[in-house]
Image (tube, rainbow, N blue to C red):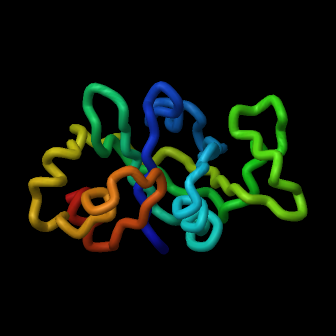
């Protein structure tokens, strides 16, 4: 099992939206960064743990956890000309973008702010600190345990 941090703007998909989706989960789609896509396509697997990180909001930081419900699969939005995520170069035989379904696990009692993460020496090697803009990023087992302790 691996661990991940997924960034979202809460106006797009919030932890409450993930919770409201229930056990059937919610599709984590619209990823259009190649490095994030590669993580989704090549490494994200069923049962992986996910830290949900809210960005572009008043309280930026980790707000809860989710679990992947299956392996990643081609993002259907890339084939839909009406979607803002449409990609004319993508075909069903050669998809370019991937998504994964996730389900709510828990809300944290308080948001773990980006500022507190950046100030904590135990988290200085996190991808979030070193390469902040990436929307899907790996989290080590030690970082996962430390953040949730």
To which quarter of the image does residue 148 belong? Answer: bottom left
Residue 1: x and y, percent? Answer: 48, 74
Quarter of the image that includes the C terminus: bottom left
40 up-or-down from 116: above or below: below
Residue at 25% x, 58% y is: 129
Query: Position of 53 compared to 69: left or right?
Result: left
Q: Is residue 86 left or right of residue 112?
A: right
Image x and y of residue 128, in percent: 31, 57
Q: Position of residue 31 (x, y in %)?
A: 59, 49
How many marks the image carries: the answer is 0
Describe residue 87's horizontal placement relative to residue 143 as left or right: right
Left or right of 127: which side holds 84? right
Percent across and percent down for residue 12 are 52, 30
Q: Residue at coordinates 41% horizontally, 66% vertically from top-left? A: 138
- Judging depth in this view, the residue of 59 and 70 nearest the camera is 59
Q: Residue at x 14, y 48 (%)?
A: 116
Work out whether residue 56 or residue 10 is closer to the camera in this orientation and state it.
56
Of 96 and 121, which appears nearest the observer? 96
Residue under the point 55% across and 66% down: 39
């Amino acid at each position: 099992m691996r661990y991940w941090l997924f960034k979202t703007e809460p106006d797009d998909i919030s932890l409450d939206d993930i919770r409201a989706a229930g056990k059937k989960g919610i599709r984590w789609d619209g990823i259009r960064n190649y490095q994030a896509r590669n993580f989704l396509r090549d490494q994200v697997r069923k049962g992986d743990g996910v830290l949900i990180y809210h960005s572009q909001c008043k309280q930026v930081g980790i707000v809860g956890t989710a679990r992947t419900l299956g392996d990643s699969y081609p993002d259907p939005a890339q084939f839909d000309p009406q979607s803002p995520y449409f990609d004319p170069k993508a075909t069903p035989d050669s998809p370019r973008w991937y998504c994964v379904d996730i389900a709510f696990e828990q809300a944290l009692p308080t948001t773990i702010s980006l500022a507190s993460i950046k100030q904590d020496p135990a988290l200085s090697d996190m991808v979030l600190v070193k390469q902040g803009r990436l929307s899907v990023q790996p989290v080590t087992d030690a970082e996962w345990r430390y953040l949730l302790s």
